[in-house]
Amino acid sequence: MAGHKLFFALRPDEQAAERIARAAAAEHVARGLVPRFRPSRIFHITLHYFGRFEGEPDPQLVAQAMRAAAELVWPAFDVGFERFASWGREGARQHPFVLTGGQSLEAVRELRDALADRLVDHGLPAVKDYEPHLTLRYDKRPAPAWEVDLAGWTASELVLVSSPQGLTQHDVIARWPLQG
């Protein structure tokens, strides 16, 4: 059986994901770049990555993560993006090309920090070093970066996702609404 990745995420609804893909494609075409993106159905902002597991993720880990998330009370908030950027060190095999931002993603950072605190309280490791982003594609070479003002979506739920390796598929294990 293929491995699975396990992570908490914020995901746009289908219409927002398509709007983001269209806007990002238009930005690419305007700069003479070919917009070859991951499917918009898997667009997301990862809040916490647990890692890759052989077979299914550990049920005890999933239960601990779910208990931690259930304790989180957080209001819904708007997500936006301020720049396209290409990440990865020189000579890397893959360079993620992402939408990211500063102030427009501050609420994501705050939610992520609160989630990390809950995870630690439940005995799970959580690293505080974090930069929110939405990965559009992976390239063999770095791509140019540029500023943009791109509306995202209203984040209204936190999800725990299992992603079977190599299938470009995200299976939502559980959902927690962000109130208000």
Image (cartoon, grey):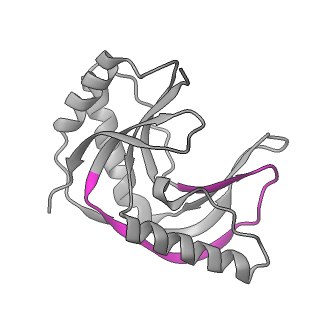
The residue lying at 28 percent from left, 64 percent from top is 77
> Magenta stretch mostly in which secondary structure?
strand
Q: How many marks?
A: 0
| Vertical relation: 93 (above or below) 29 | above
The image quadrant where one finds the C terminus is: bottom left
Q: Is residue 128 left or right of residue 94?
A: left
Q: Position of residue 160 (x, y in %)?
A: 33, 39
Q: Is residue 26 left or right of residue 121?
A: right
Residue 23 lies in the magenta-colored region: no
Q: Position of residue 8 (x, y in %)?
A: 37, 40
Q: Position of residue 141 (x, y in %)?
A: 82, 53
Q: Which residues are magenta?
A: 134-157
Q: Nearer the viewer, residue 28 or 112?
A: 28
Residue 97 quadrant: bottom right
Q: Is residue 58 left or right of residue 132?
A: left
Q: Nearer the viewer, residue 87 or 136?
A: 136
| Vertical relation: 86 (above or below) 130 | below
The residue lying at 80 percent from left, 49 percent from top is 140
Q: Is residue 28 left or right of residue 157?
A: right
Toward the right, the furthest residue is 91
